[in-house]
Image (spheres, grey):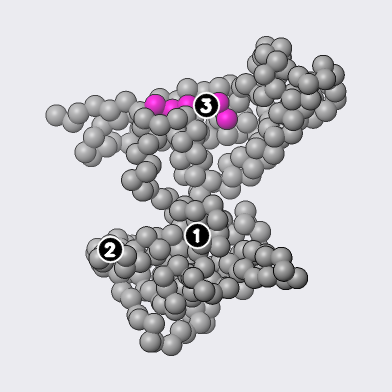
């Protein structure tokens, strides 16, 4: 799959612009403040349903406007990639032709962000549509896969373990539905289990049945995450690197009934879960290609 067309309306610096992409590699060039980062943000939004630049979605709406949108047509051709090409842009003066009037087997994705005020109270709304049908974000993400790499991602080499976990999660969640669902379920169960541990630490009372329920969920989903992380890292390590040879070493925090029981006293004392994929780490060892 690839992004064939992109339409932006009141998105960041764009009032109304439509872009056409070629099947090969696309190079986006332009002077500073010309909107290159805004364009990449819109593409990533259609893949992940979120911005990589801000946690405040309202910032994606053009200043002074209340509704912004990014709409993309995703092609599924059986044609191999062609030569490298630069991006083709049609200016704001050209009328917008609805993207969903094109080839039937293409998928039209749209994210609409809106803000306003009702009864003196501000509101914000984000809507995801696939072929004009509203979808939840998890279902929306299944239709277009994009992996982002920006200069700040270099921090995964020397930064905290959470940065490395987040980077790997983004890569896997963009292409693996089972991993994405397991990650969502794991995070939810982890929050609930940590709340129980905090309660035990504060009161000294433990509800074993509630622990068993959340323990089962984090074990089941945590083991899926660990297995898929390991397979992904093995895939990376098994492929030849052209410029710099490196391997990724995976420091697993295994989660199981035995491990949870082993750390039970320490977890009740700290009020947090001490084992599981949220404690994983990764390291990168590089070798010079001579």
Q: Are marks 2 and 1 in contact (CB under 8 Å)?
A: no
Mark earlier in primary sequence (2, 1): 2
Rounded to the nearest angstrom, the CA distance separating label 2 from label 3 is 39 Å
Instruction: Give x and y (percent) for residue 152.
Output: 37, 43
Q: Residue at x 70, y 34 (%)?
A: 191
Q: Residue at x 67, y 65 (%)?
A: 122
Residue at point 70%, 22% (across, down): 271
Q: Which mark is residue 45?
A: 1
Q: Is 280 colored magenta in this rendering?
A: yes
Q: Quadrant of residue 92?
A: bottom left
- Please provide percent x and percent y for residue 209: 85, 25
Which residue is disc 2 drawn over? 32
Q: Is residue 76 magenta?
A: no
Left or right, 194 with reference to 45: right
Residue 148: x and y, percent? Answer: 41, 50
Helix, strand or loop at mark 2: loop
Residue named by callout 3: 280
Picture quarter with the C terminus: top left
| Magenta residues (range) | 278-283
């Amino acid at each position: 799959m690839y992004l064939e067309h992109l339409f932006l309306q009141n998105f960041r610096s764009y009032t109304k612009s439509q872009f056409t992409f070629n099947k090969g590699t696309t190079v986006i060039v332009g002077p500073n403040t010309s909107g290159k980062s805004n364009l990449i943000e819109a593409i990533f939004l259609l893949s992940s349903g979120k911005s990589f630049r801000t946690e405040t979605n309202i910032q994606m709406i053009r200043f002074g406007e209340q509704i912004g949108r990014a709409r993309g047509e995703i092609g599924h051709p059986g044609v191999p990639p062609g030569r490298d090409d630069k991006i083709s842009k049609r200016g704001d003066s050209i009328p917008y032709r609805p993207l969903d009037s094109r080839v039937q087997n293409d998928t039209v994705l749209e994210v609409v962000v809106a803000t306003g005020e009702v009864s003196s109270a501000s509101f914000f709304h984000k809507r995801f549509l696939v072929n004009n049908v509203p979808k939840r974000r998890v279902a929306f993400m299944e239709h277009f896969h994009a992996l982002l790499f920006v200069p700040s991602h270099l921090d995964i080499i020397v930064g905290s373990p959470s940065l490395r976990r987040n980077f790997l999660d983004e890569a896997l969640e963009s292409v693996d539905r089972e991993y994405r669902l397991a990650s969502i379920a794991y995070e939810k169960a982890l929050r609930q289990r940590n709340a129980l541990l905090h309660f035990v630490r504060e009161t000294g009372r433990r509800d074993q049945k509630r622990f068993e329920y959340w323990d089962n969920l984090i074990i089941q989903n945590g083991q899926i995450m660990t297995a898929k992380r390991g397979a992904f890292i093995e895939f990376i390590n098994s492929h030849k690197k052209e410029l710099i040879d490196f391997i990724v070493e995976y420091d697993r925090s295994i989660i199981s009934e035995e491990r949870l029981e082993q750390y039970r006293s320490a977890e009740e004392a700290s009020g947090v879960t001490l084992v599981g994929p949220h404690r994983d780490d990764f390291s990168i060892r590089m070798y010079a290609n001579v």
